Amino acid sequence: MSGPIDPPLTIGIEEEYLLVDRVTRATAVDPPQELLRTCEQRLPGLVRPEFLTSQIEVGTPVCRTIREARAELAALRRTVAEVADGYGLAIIAASTHPFSEWKEQKHTDKERYHILARDMQAAARRLLICGMHVHLGIDDDELRIDLMNQVGYFLPHLLALSTSSPFWRGEISGLKSYRLSVFDELPRTGLPSRFDSYGEYRRHVDVLVGAGLFTDASMIWWDVRPSARFPTLEMRITDVCPLLDDAVTIAALYRCVCRMLVRLRRANQRWRLYDSLLVNENRWRAKRYGIDAGLVDFGKGEVVACAELFDELIELIGDDAQALDCVDEVARCRTIVRAGTSAHRQLATFETAVAAGRSRHEALCAVVDDLIEETVRGL
């Protein structure tokens, strides 16, 4: 099926950035309030504060094609970077800062964030992390839940391609995505629960809301979830990518996988549902090794190299990439597997700087410099 199908799976991308001081390279704990106001004036409705004052979030409008989404995201990055530069700051699209301390951060003066800080305590205060979220427009509530149940199988694949958080508090964590370990300290994270219907999902949410545990479903932070604000299925597992092209590739893959699942549903078929015990093992492998050590192919019962897995995935969603006009963007996942993710580049920069005789802190600053440059490359 290469022609149009329903729903059209419109797309929107949200990214979170860290604000860093261009001199110290540390996070900007007290950025000028005028910075956010200027961004909001230039990008009305598309930029907002995040939990920490050293963070800023952007979100594209609803887009009908992946190329439109890329252009919108590039404009957002470019504008926020220009505004930040006027205050001696820069943005980095990385999921952790190479050396800044979470204990030195401040949370944004907003009621929602006050509640989060009060209820979650140190688990929230440690959230010096950033992610990328991809929304797919799906008006049908039942379809949204059905796709959420099935797409979990592919989430570790997307995470492996996105890893950009190998450092934590100036140390090499040993994980390609340390961000996910920090985020997993919060409740209601990780793989989503499985539901037979949208009504069942709502009944479970209503129990927790009715008990006063949280105000609405936006405080369920699963790796993929029905958005509480939009009629979308929101993928949240991935790190934010410094290279715009990497982000676009991951968004295109997610969109094509969901279209493939819709195709199966239209033919009265579905992707096999695997227990979370199995999928969580791949989730761990993705955040620990990224693309380096492969993932488990549950059908084969063995670990398969990521290069082979993504070759198979490209073939599986080939018709969907054609129909959505993103063949090149999807194929670029092979480039990521071959050249490495941001986590690989950050570690290489650090090790090269240390080998050249620079101090540990100087080497970490060199990593920040590379992240600043990559975040605005090709815009």
Image (spheres, rainbow, N blue to C red):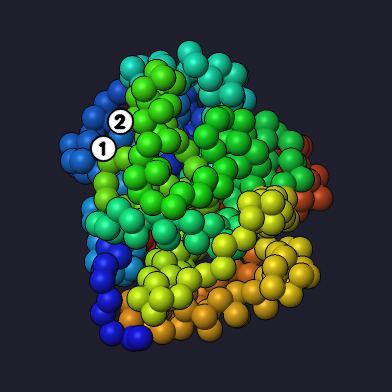
* Residue 38 percent coordinates (x, y): 23, 34
Q: Quadrant of residue 152?
A: bottom right
Q: Is residue 187 left or right of residue 31?
A: right
Looking at the rendered structure, the kind of residue marked 2 is: Leu
Residue at 42%, 35% (x, y): give it: 204
- Left or right: 362 as drawn, with respect to 143: right
Q: Nearer the viewer, residue 283 or 168?
A: 283
Q: Mark 1–mark 2 contact, CB under 8 Å?
A: yes
- Along the line of sight, the residue nearer the viewer: 197 or 3: 197
Q: Quadrant of the N terminus?
A: bottom left
Q: Position of residue 262 (x, y in %)?
A: 38, 71
Q: Vertical placement of 103 versus 277: above or below? A: above
- Front-most of 221 and 340? 221
Q: Which residue is mark 2?
A: 35
In the image, residue 81 lies at what x, y percent? Answer: 36, 44
Compared with 66, 115 (above or below) is above
Residue at point 64% right, 55% down? 275
Q: Quarter of the image containing the C terminus?
A: bottom left
Q: From this viewpoint, which residue is outermost toward the top?
A: 118
Please say whether residue 43 is visible from this viewpoint. yes
Mark 1, Cα crowd under 10 Å, few <14 / some 14-19 / many 20+, is: many
Number of the label disc, if any, that sits on residue 39: 1
Residue type at the position of mark 1? Cys
* Relative depth, front residue between 328 and 181: 181
- Count how many numbered circles sit on residues in the image: 2
Numbered tag placed on residue 256 in the rendering: none
Q: Which percent across, then down, holds residue 343?
A: 65, 53
| Point 59% across, 24% down: residue | 123
With respect to residue 119, does 274 lie above or below? below
Can you tell which quarter of the image residue 45 is in?
A: top left
Does residue 376 appear in the picture of this structure?
A: no
In what element is the residue under mark 1?
A: helix
